[in-house]
């Protein structure tokens, strides 16, 4: 006799995932995005009774991934017109960076490259002279 298909996902799993995603959606600053993500989640909740719970959980996880992307972009600090759009104290403006040490290293590397090139040319000339 054939066993009935076992449901791996329970309603408790669905409710837990929905609650987690709703909490993340509430952290979104933009009202329009927050409303759109909430509508997506509400639509998925309405489908729970009509569809496979595993599929519903998959859709909820997809929505959660979208919410995570929005939160990541929201939390990134963008330097714009000399000001940071996010309020953090660890923003460093490009003009404030001291490039002296980097310039010294670059000049040293240029000199070493020229010396190596001269050495290679000298070795090549010696090889040509011996032929």
Image (cartoon, helix red, strand yellow):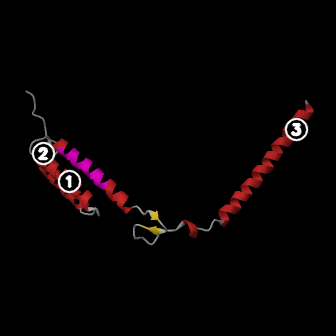
Nearest-to-viewer mark from 2 and 1: 2
Q: Is residue 68 above or below residue 50?
A: below
Question: Which percent across, then down, holds residue 38?
Answer: 20, 56
Question: Which percent across, then down, holds residue 59?
Answer: 22, 45
> For residue 97, which quarter of the picture?
bottom right
Name which of mark 3 and mark 1 comes first in the sequence: 1
Question: Which percent across, then down, holds residue 105?
Answer: 69, 60
Name, please, the residue furthest toward the front: 81
Query: Left or right: where does residue 18 sit relative to residue 106?
Result: left
| Quarter of the C terminus within the rendering | top right
Please tell me which residue is depicted at 70% across the width and 62% down the height of the picture: 104
For residue 64: magenta?
Answer: yes
| Quarter of the N terminus within the rendering | top left
Identify residue for label 3: 125
43, 55: nearer the viewer:
43
Mark 2 and mark 1: Cα distance apart in space: 15 Å
Label disc, if present, on residue 17 of the rendered structure: 1
Question: Which SS class for mark 1?
Answer: helix
6, 28: nearer the viewer:
28
Identify residue for label 2: 47
Question: Which SS class for mark 2?
Answer: helix
Nearest-to-viewer mark from 3 and 1: 3
Name, please, the residue furthest toward the top: 1
Q: Is residue 50 above or below residue 29?
A: above
- In the rendered structure, are the residues bearing label 2 and label 1 in contact, judged by CB atoms less than 8 Å apart? no
Query: Left or right: where does residue 100 sit relative to residue 128?
Result: left
Mark 3 and mark 1: Cα distance apart in space: 74 Å
Mark 3 and mark 2: Cα distance apart in space: 80 Å
Magenta segment range? Answer: 56-68
Name which of mark 2 and mark 1 comes first in the sequence: 1
């Amino acid at each position: 006799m054939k066993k009935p298909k076992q449901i791996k996902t329970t309603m408790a799993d669905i409710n837990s995932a929905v609650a987690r995603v709703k909490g993340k959606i509430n952290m979104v600053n933009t009202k329009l995005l927050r409303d759109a993500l909430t509508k997506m989640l509400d639509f998925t909740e309405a489908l729970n009774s009509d569809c496979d719970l595993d599929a519903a959980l998959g859709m909820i996880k997809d929505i959660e991934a979208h919410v995570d992307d929005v939160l990541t972009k929201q939390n990134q600090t963008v330097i714009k017109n000399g000001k940071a759009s996010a309020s953090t104290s660890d923003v460093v403006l490009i003009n404030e960076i001291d490039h002296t040490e980097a310039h010294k290293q670059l000049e040293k590397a240029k000199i070493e490259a020229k010396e190596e090139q001269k050495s290679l040319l000298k070795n090549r000339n010696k090889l040509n002279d011996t032929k």
